[in-house]
Image: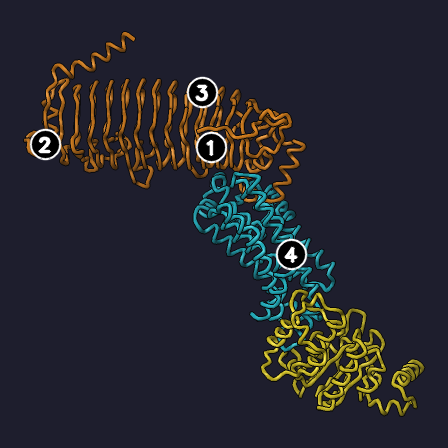
Amino acid sequence: MISVNQLSKRFGKLQALDALSLELQAGCSYALIGPNGSGKTTFIKSILGLVLPDSGTIHMDGENISKHWQYRDKIGYMPQIGHYPENIRIGQLLNMVQDIRQYHGAFDDHLYKAFRFDQLLNKRMHTLSGGTRQKVSAVLAFMFKPDVLILDEPTAGLDPLSVELLKDKIQLEKEAGKLILISSHIMSDLDHIASEMVYLYEGKLLYNDSIQKLKAETGEERLGRAIAKLMSDSVNS
Amino acid sequence: MLKIIRYILLDLLRSRFTLFYTLLLFLSTVGLYQIDGDPGKVMLSLLNILLMVVPLVSIVFSTIHFHNSYEFIELMLSQPVPRSRVLFAEFFATALSLGLAFMVGIGVPMLLFGAGGGSLILVGTGFLLTIVFVSLAFLASVLTRDKARAIGIALLFWFYFSLIYDAFVLWLLYSFSDYPLDQPTLILVSLNPIDLARIVMMLQMDISALMGYTGAFFRNFFGSYQGILFSLSALLIWAVWPIAVANRIFNKKDL
Amino acid sequence: MYFRTLLFLLIIFPGCTYARVLEVSPASRLSLAGAIGLAKNGDTVVVIGGRHRSGNLLIQKSMTLLGKNKPVLDGEGKYEILTIQAARVKVSGFRFERSGRSNIDDYAGLKAQGADFLEVSHNEFSETFFGIHVSKSNFVHIHHNQLKASSLLEYELGNGIHLWKCHSARIHRNRIEGHRDGIYFEFVTKTSIQSNYSYKNKRYGLHFMFSNDNSYRNNTFRNNGAGVAVMYTARVHMEGNTFDQNWGASSYGLLLKDIRDSEVLNNRFTGNTSGVYMEGTSRTRFERNTFKNNGWAVQLQASCDGNSFHRNNFIGNTFDIATNGSLVLNTTDHNYWDKYQGYDLNRDGTGDIPFYPVSLFSMIVERIPPAMLLWRSFMVFLLNRAESVLPAITPEDLKDHSPSMKPYDLR
């Protein structure tokens, strides 16, 4: 569904992405992993069109996304930290994003209900806790039924109950055939919801295969340990 | 775009800063009217607010606002919407909120204490000048990702237009005082929006002196509506080009 | 006094005792020229209405010419309308239209020469070249006349009321519009000019040279091409006049050039490019005048000395006083300056620190006129501030030691 071909991006001395090629399929959920500065954020921003690559292409459903913006109505994005205008209400924010997307279909109100947003609609953004803002971001990402979900550290700051609610939702969407790309440091969160792993290291693709296979190869049952082993292998080799 | 502007405006108009700015202008204007019975002197003080405070507040606040909204702008841009639309929406909302703050803060007391045609032009010019400096602020903002540096650039713009440029013009006039300088002077001052606003106001307050020394060229220029029309259209150009350049840069920028 | 009374009797008695009245009307067969020819000293010719195209009318007798129902004397654009060459002539109630134009002969609506005790009153002058042109005539009384010309070209215009070599005239309550100079005097002395309204004249509202000992009271000079210019004269007394809206490069409310020992009291200078411009002027007192909303209230050239400014109001002027020199031998005190920012701790109504009415920037503009466009900029504000703290360029001597804290209640 998303095919990345020879994607490169350099910020000054830092080669953030180095000839990265990758295919992302619908119905799969990808765990985007790598140490700090490995190019995860640049990769996500490239897909969103926020960072313009130096070379290489990204195709979505066969179409080059460069200089286009309409393709983004297929994407739901949940940023790492949600910053919103301080003085508007949650309800207004939801309306606003709906207006921006010019979305007229039925909403996915699963998370909206699960997080009990009907009681929060009149709260102004500056009164919200970090966790609640994170919930707002989550609701916005899923609300317009996008085909692709890009979640950047989705569970950071959420209470355990909400984490479970969100993970259930991700599972549900995966089963519904959506493409899900999750970047996270919390391996235990990824363990059950990600089926594939994309491991970036210094802008290069180090590993891209199913998590099942990874576990088999490394002989580890837990994803965290499997990755640790993979990392030490890559450093040694 | 109108809907995006509406929501951002909704946010800005409720922000503590906008309210504070409006109140500050309001109280100063009322104070000026009460301390000084002479409307001419009040106009003079208001002119100083217009030429110094309004550009400074407009450019610094807009720059800070832009950088504080950076993540939100990113979020908006992850939606199916072109970058220009988001930038212009932010621009119009910021300009409108500051412009309204100015109009209410200065205009309402003026109406209360009896306003003449001159004060109407002062309010209009202030509104236009606000837009110009918001426009410059957006240019400063897209030039760098770093907030502190952007504020630095913004302050530099302000300092340049309110002081350095005029000193430079005076130096130039002094150096070339043996040559006919009417037209060059006019061109020079139209390269500075603060000077343009000043001239619009001078046409209201100092027309007697303007008609004095200066030659036939100025007399024709300032004697008719040409002068005010020219100055206002030049100000309009100043409101447009920085944001247009900012838009070009913003479209090619990594966020 | 004895002489005056005798004069008075001489004027009054001939009229009373021997006067005949000749009437010119559409009904009578007598023409205007014919009637003037028939009249003898002391007679009165009454003209009732009508339009009279009589070419040039010449009066060489002491007679009265009286118009009823505003008879029109039409010069057809060719002739000087009325020429008077006798003393004690009185012309009243006519409308003079369209005299000839000649810069060589100075054609006028009414021209008098050697016409002592001439009285011209209640006449209208429309599109005459010169309006009233009087030379070598004393004790002339010109009052309640209206003069209007409307050509746009200065060479097609003469002066409204023009006096040359006269003394003891009275010019009262006339309205003059659109001429070259509204009122023009050369070698005119001991004359009173009062309550005239001179406006929209192409050059000066009032213009005189070599005319000593005249007094100008309660006149209004408004919107004239170059305002009012007076030159080479001593002992001028100007009181209660209004100098208003005289705009333009080298346009002055009042231009004083080589004037000495004069008084300028209680006048209003409003909305002029330059309220008063002084050159070579000495020992002249300015008191209780109002200078309001002028570009420059007073421009004092370095050639002026011994002048004093006392108890005047300076309000809303772009510049209060400008000068081109550094040594100033004139004094200012007890004036009200709206730009004064000092304080009055002992509450005696005058400020405790002196006021310097000459700003640095006014001197810069004097040198580089286009710099005017930088006026009211922050940079200029700083320059002026710095200069007022540490005067370096502006004349240190020109200051008001005791500026008034409040404006004076002037007319």
Name the amino acid type tagged 3: Ser
x, y percent for residue C281: 48, 23
Q: Which chain is cyan?
A: B
Residue C149 position (above or below residue A116): above
The residue type indicated by label 4 comes to Ile
Which chain does tag 4 point to? B
| Marking on residue B83 | none
In percent of the image, x 87 and y 89: which residue is there? A214
**B160 left or right, relative to C150:** right
Label 2, label 4: how far apart the Cα atoms are: 82 Å
Q: Callout 3: 10 Å neighbours few (<14), some, many (20+)?
A: many
**Nearer-N-terminus badge (1/3):** 3
Instruction: Name the residue that disc number 1 marks.
Output: C275
| SS under mark 4 | helix
The percent position of residue C213, horizontal first and vertical second, equals 38, 18
Let me know if residue C393 appears in the view: yes
Q: Which residue corresponds to the image point at 49% horizontal and 50% vertical from the top-left? A: B120
Q: Same chain, marks 3 and 2?
A: yes
Q: Are marks 4 and 3 on the same chain?
A: no
Residue beneath disc 3: C262
Q: Amino acid at mark 2?
A: Ser
